[in-house]
Image (cartoon, rainbow, N blue to C red):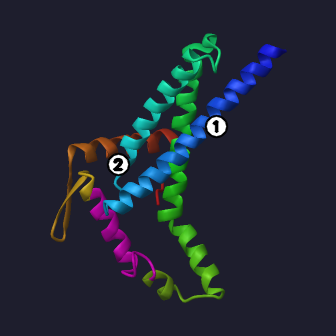
Amino acid sequence: MLAVMTSIVIASLAAAIVLLLVIGIHLAYLAISRSARVGGAPMTFLTLAGVGVAVLWVGLEWLMMSGWIEANSGPGLSVGAVCFYLAATIVYVEIRSLLSRGYSLRILIDLMTHGKELPIEDLKSSYGDGLGVVGILAKRLETLKSLGIIHVNGKKVGPLTRQGHLLAGLGLSLRRLLKLETVG
């Protein structure tokens, strides 16, 4: 019974550390992106996520060596904690993406803040930092260009870069595997 209780306490401690790391990454990402004026730099976030994995692994190993956690928990605890951390990070990224770029959610928020019905033209014009629906496309293309996924030359878009081909191929394969016909 004591062994079960100890395992529960260890798992709870590891989960708390994981959640604190995800919160820490969020706060560090916000501080870096605001101070450097680089809104949404994916490499910054990936670097912070990698640092989080290292901190988690080393931290758990230190807790085991110092006797705070039973050493017989072994690498299984660290591997499990890192997997939980990566899953929590992916959930965080998805929620952040939904909240910052979700069209449907934006429509609901616009309608709620106005407290009444709105003409479709008003909804269209509020997208893309006031540039409308066309502004959304322009922002997305700029993001893809800055990530090195596509080439943009004046009013022409394409071809894809190597990374673009890799991502598009992966996306198509996953869509086929999941039998998704429509996207967007």
User: Who's the residue at 47% across and 60% down the image?
Assistant: 184
Name the residue furthest front: 66
Relative image position of residue 159 (x, y in whole percent): 19, 54
| Closer to the camera in the image, 164 or 131 | 131
Residue 57 sits inside the magenta stretch = no
> Would you call the spot at circle 2 few (<14 residues within 10 Å), some (14-19), or many (20 or more)?
some
Magenta part, dominant SS:
helix
Above-or-below relation of 78 to 120:
above
Name the residue furthest left: 153
Give the secondary structure at mark 2: helix
Label 2, label 1: how far apart the Cα atoms are: 24 Å
Which numbered mark, 2 or 1, is in the foreground of this view? Answer: 1
Relative image position of residue 73 (x, y in whole percent): 62, 15
Quick check: 48 left or right of 162?
right
Q: Which quarter of the rendering shows the N terminus?
A: top right
Numbered circle sitting on residue 16: 1
Above-or-below relation of 50 to 108:
above
| Location of mark 2 (residue) | 44
Relative image position of residue 31 (x, y in whole percent): 41, 57
Quick check: 172 left or right of 146?
right
Above-or-below relation of 107 to 37:
below
User: Who's the residue at 23% across and 55% down the image?
Assistant: 150
User: Who's the residue at 55% across and 15% down the image?
Assistant: 65
Amino acid at circle 2: Thr
Amino acid at circle 1: Ala
| Closer to the camera in the image, 114 or 25 | 25
Quick check: 183 left or right of 110?
left
Numbered range of the magenta stretch? 126-144
Residue 129 sits inside the magenta stretch = yes
